[in-house]
Image (tube, helix red, strand yellow):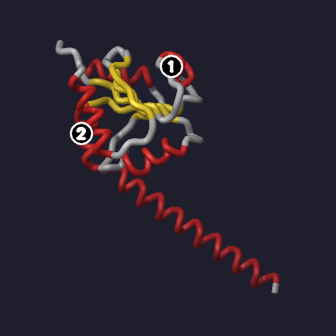
Amino acid sequence: MKRKIVISALLLSATVLGLAFISTNNDDEKAKGGIQFMESNWQKAKEEAKKQHKLIFLDAYATWCGPCRMLKKQTFPNKEAGDFFNKNFINVAMDMEKGDGPALSEQFRIEAYPTLIIADESGNAITYTKGFIEPKQLIEFGQYGLSLKKKP
């Protein structure tokens, strides 16, 4: 009897792990068409922005934030949003409670998560929005940010 329980538990565990792996791979596939973010490196984002003469799109998030997770799952994987932001911005996602996050949170006076910021090559905020937005709204936000970019 104990042997059957152990075998059943092992089979159940293997099934759960297998399903988790399949789910992760599907999420990775979706993300390939979406916005490609560099993680947690504000200085590198500024350097790339200067090199490529692009604005910076900052996703300021917290790991416990529900709307932040919704953005990552529903908005950022969108192909149209990805095509637009990958072409026009240096995209960086920052956990505002780790690494450079707390200092940036203070610099930008972030009061809510998610806060999406468009910044110039030097890291100065040009515009921002708070909360969850759909892909179409995100693209409109990006277009607005580009319209504010100073011409060289």
Asked which quadrant contains residue 124, the reply is top left
- Of the pair 140 and 88, the residue shown nearer to us: 140
Tell me the element at label 2. Answer: helix
Q: CA distance from mark 2 to mark 1?
A: 27 Å
Quarter of the figure with the C terminus = top left
Q: Is residue 136 above or below residue 148?
A: below
Residue 55 image offset from top left, x and y in percent: 29, 24
Q: Read off the residue under disc 2.
A: 84
* Residue 71 numbered tag: none
Asked which quadrant contains residue 92, the reply is top left
Q: Is residue 47 visible?
A: no
Q: Read off the residue under disc 1.
A: 109
Q: Is residue 33 above or below residue 115?
A: below
Question: Which residue occupies 55% across, 41% down?
Answer: 65
Image side of residue 124 versus residue 51, left or right: right
Quarter of the figure with the N terminus = bottom right
Question: Which residue occupies 43% across, 45% down?
Answer: 71
Residue 87 image offset from top left, x and y in percent: 23, 35
Residue 101 image offset from top left, x and y in percent: 53, 25
Report crowding for label 2: few under 14, some 14 to 19, many 20 or more residues within 10 A (C-alpha). Answer: some
Asked which quadrant contains residue 16, the reply is bottom right
- Which numbered disc flags the more N-terminal residue, 2 or 1? 2
Q: Residue furthest bottom?
A: 1
